[in-house]
Structure formats: C-alpha cells, structure tokens
Amino acid sequence: MKKQTRTVVIALSLATVLVLAIVVALPGIVALNKVKNEIAETLSQASGRPVTIGKLSLSLYPWLGIRLDGAELANAPTFGKTPLARVDDALVEVRVLPLFAGHIVLRRVVVTGLKLNLRENAAGHTNWAALIRTPKRPAPTKATRAEAHEAPAFALLRAAGLTVTNASVTYRNARTGARDILSHFTVRLGEIRPGRPVAVHLAGVLKTAGHGPFPFRLSARAIRQHKGLLLNPFRLSIATLKAVGTVQATETRSGLKAHGHLHIPAFAPRPLLAALGLSYRPSDPKALRTASGRLAFRLSPRQLSLAPFTIRFDQTLVTGRLVRLAHPLLYRVHLAISSLALAPYLPPKPSAPPAPQPVQGPGRPQAGTKTPSPLLSLPVMGTVTIGRLVAHGLTLTRVSAALHGRHGHIRLQPLTMDLYGGTFAGRLALKAAHPLPWRLAARLSQVHIGALLRALHMFPEFSGLLNAHVRLRGSGVALLPIEQSVSGRLTADMPRGALRGLDINFIAKDPKAVVGPHRLKKVAGTVFTRLHAQATIANSLVTLQALSLHTARAAVHGQGTMTLLPTKTLNTLLKVTLPSGLTVPVRVRGPIGHVHFAVSLNRLLSGSGKGLGSAFKSLGGRLKSFLGIH
C-alpha cells in the first residue's frame, strides 16, 4: 500500500511540474515573435550593429528548449554588406525544475554553421574592434549600488557542455594582403560549473596565404581567474608536432593579453612541412629527421614575443628571441646557431645543368623573376651568429651579421667571420625573388690561401697568407646556380708564399731548363716574396687580367683564363723574366687540381731578334754546346 501511494505521489508531482511548465511557457509560446524581436533589439543595442533573427521555436518535453533558425550580425559600415557573423542553427536546452529555485541548469548548447567574417583595412582598423572594446561605465549612484547588492534573478548552476560544429572564420588584411581561412572548425566544452575547471577541445583546418591547408587539434583544462583564464595543461597538435605547456590569458581595456610557455618533444618535421603545404625535399635523405624545442611567449595587442626559445633539429641547436611589432609591422630577430652544415639541407642537384642565364645589372630583376617570397619580404631587423658553418666546402667559424630587411631587400651588414686563420669582413645584399639575386663586397685579411683553395677544389699549388678585395654578384644558394650567374672582380695580394710544381728559380739558375723537356721534380716549387693579381668573372669565365710575382732570382708576369663550367680548366701564360733580361714563357694549363707547367719553346724562339740574341749572349757557350751550334 505504501509503495502504491508513493507511486501516485510521484506521478501527481510530475504532472504538476508539467502543468506549471506549460503555464510558465505558454505566454512565451503565444508571444514568441515579440520575444524574438526584443532579443534582436537588445543585441543590436549592445553591439551597435543590426541583428536579425530568423525563426524562433520552443520545445517543452523532455527538456525546455529554444531553437534559433538563422541569425546575422551586420558588418561595420565601411566593410561591405557581408555580415560579420552568421549562425545557421542554435539550440539551448534547460532543465525546468531548477528554474523555480532561480538556478539555470543547461543540458546542452549546440551551435551549427557559425561563420565569422573578420576584416582589417589598409589603415589598420578592424571590423570587430568596437565589439570587444570595454564600454565606459558611468559613475555609480545610490540606485546602481543598491542594484549591485541585489541577488540576480537567475544564476548559472552548471551546464553539461557547449558544442559548435561546422564553423568557419575568414580573415583578410588589406594592408598586408594576408588571407587566412579557418574551416571545419569545431569547439567542444565539457561540464561547466562556477569555480571549477572546464575541458576545452578545438579542431579545424587552417589555410594561410602561400601555404596549403593543414589540420590542427587543441585541448586544454581551462580555469577561470580574476580578469583572466588559465589553460593548464595546454596541448596543441599539428601533424607530427605536439606542444604541451601553460597559457594564461587576460582581457584588458587595450585588448587580449596572454603569456605562457610550451615544450615541444622530439617529432619528425617532414610530415609537418607537408601538412603546411611546403614542398621541401633536402638532398640528404637523413637531413631534418628530428626536431624539438622550448619557448616562452608573451602576446599583447601591440606585439608578440617569443623569448627565449630553443630549437634543435638534427645536430643543430638554435637559441634566441623573436619579437613581432604590430604598428608599424616589424620583426626583431636575434638568433644564435651552434653549428650548421648547409649542403644536406639544400635541394638535390639537377641531373643536367640548365643553360646559363644572362647576368643582369645589380638593380635589375632577372628574366622570369617570380613573386617575392612572403617570408623573405617581411620587415626584419636583428642579429645572427653561427658558431660553425659549412657551406660549399668552406668551413666558416664565428660568423656574425646584423640583419636588415624591408620591402623584399635583405642586407647582412656588417658580416664578419673567421676564415682559415684569417678574417672576413664585408656586406651581403639579397633580394626576395627567385632565384634569389645577391651582391657581395668583402675584404679578406691574412687568410691561409692553401686551405681556402683546397676547400674550393682550386689551385692546391698555392700556399701563404692572402689579403684580398672581392666584389661579386649572382643568384641562388646552391653551387651550380652560383657558378652560372656569378660575375664581378677581385684583387689579391700575398706578401709571401710558395707555388708547388714550378721551380722558377731553377729556370733562372739552369739554362738547360729553357729548352727541351721541362725536367722538374714533382716536389720542386717556388718561394716568392710578393704576389699581386687582378681578375674579373663573367659568364662562367675567370679572366686573369694581371699577375705579378717576384722571387729571389726572377720576376713573373702573366695573363690567362679559367673556365668554371662545365669543367674548371686553367689556361694561362706566364712570362718569367730572368736577371739577365731573358724572358721565358711558361704555359700553365689543365683541370684544377691537375695543372701542368711547361716551357713554351715556340714562343721563346718566335721572339724578337734582339731578345733572342740577348738570350744566347747571356747563356754563352754552354747553351751553344747544348744546342749543337758551332
């Protein structure tokens, strides 16, 4: 009997609640259009923009639900007729019984088809700034103070969650030309209770200008704080990259501010680059196999700061800081690179070398120039240091450069480094276009010429200390494009040194060396007291315009050429002047690394009668006997 009575009481209670809910909701059902208009008018006054709402419907069972079918928020007057925001469908479900106690318990909130149209004009003004700007509050009065102490009619007790599906965000910047699209955007919030953390999950596909679309996922544990929000832990996933850390955000009068730190465990960078739409394939299949990093960041409406940060890829460690200033746009970069071998990260060499391109003037773009890279065209200022850099066979240490970039022009000035026992000081200018035109002006001091030339696979016969002035221009970063396009001039001086393979003093000492086979030992060489040379480079041809070399017994002057492509081949004629006045021609020819020296007897005998007579007179009877002259 007690059990039956209990059942009847529960049934009557439920019926009473249902009747009360119908009584409460009935006026809203009757005047639903009026409620819709009031909501739209309230939102319009709050935002300062016209708000339109489509169909509004109400459900009573099993939950009290309000469904909104279509709503739009108008754009700012100067940003066109496309709405700033649009919602295709929205549903809010509330439990009925807690409403009688002044509590709101949400079962679910589902928003479908949210579309945001964000714009920034050439003057830097946005179409959303007025909506998030904190309004000025009037001075409090006695009435407002009394209202502030009154308890609100309803208070949010908890919400089962919020879901936003099939959303999209479009951002366009008329000043920079940027266009970013966030599509297939999904937001899911876990159970919401005042004073308790909320689980947040975001996912979507982001496409920026110049890059392909890439998916991402973000999850965090959000904790509401005084004037801010703490995300701890914060997790971000993009392809193979996963970042874990802490983010703290605060809303201020000037805008959103945030700071925190992230840790990026070791990951494979190549799938990430593919997800970003970057078709990068290094020549070494083992290059760029792993990467990791740590960084601290700080965000404000005026700037974004990544400082300090540490990135490690393969065996290279990069540390430094990056600051992005908003107005005017400027990137301040300070990088310190431990050690880097450039060759493994360059693109693979082509199977067949393309035809050489005509050399253009330093201020003229080359034919077929592509649109400048957006990354290289950014305004930038800062410093770059590299402990050890290996590029095209050269080993450079203690590389330091001041970086200046604006309007697609990049300067490394001053550019200094240690180079094979000596120093390099100069400047390098590049243009952000394909195939990356560049200009170099530098001074080399006390460089060990033998080590330098061996690294370049050129003239291993020389040794000594080199002082030189270099002015070159060309394009590309790989060796083949550089050799195809390089042009300019250089001047070299050596106070002392040695030349292996040719004993000029032996020629001056032994007259027999003038004629017949050039009988020199492979270990023989020449020690000189001074060398001066001038050369020009154009169309893969090095022209030695002037060469002056002095030894203890002779003076050497010469001219010649060296072909860079397809093979590095030398063809130079040296004129060795002996103390007696006799000039002995010596032909230097052959591929670099296998140069041969030979006395040019034909040129010697075809000289002037006066010169030949002087030669015979100085050589005397020994030379006549050797030649069989009686």
Image (cartoon, helix red, strand yellow):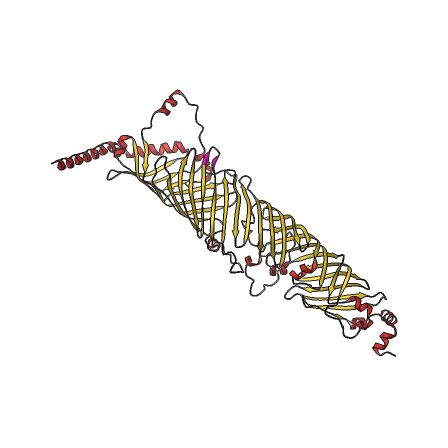
Indicate the position of residue 457 as horizontal and vertical percent values: 65, 63
Indicate the position of residue 64 as horizontal and vertical percent values: 26, 37
Magenta segment: does it hold 255? yes
Q: Residue at x 67, y 52 (%)?
A: 424
Image quadrant holding the N terminus, namely top left
Comparing 541 with 268, the one in front is 268
Q: Is residue 129 above or below residue 497?
A: above
Comparing 240 with 152, the one in front is 240
Comparing 522 with 502, the one in front is 522
Q: Is residue 286 above or below residue 102?
A: below
Indicate the position of residue 140 as horizontal and vertical percent values: 42, 23
38 left or right of 574?
left
Magenta segment: does it hold 588? no
Can you name the residue that lies furthest to the left here?
A: 1
Indicate the position of residue 218 as horizontal and vertical percent values: 41, 46
Can you name the residue that lies furthest to the front here?
A: 523
Q: Residue at x 58, y 53 (%)?
A: 339
Q: Main secondary structure of the magenta part?
A: strand
Which segment did they paint magenta? 250-257
Figure quadrant of residue 548: bottom right
* Count of picture labels: 0
Q: Residue at x 67, y 61 (%)?
A: 453
Image quadrant holding the C terminus, namely bottom right
Can you name the residue that lies furthest to the top here?
A: 142
Figure quadrant of residue 511: bottom right
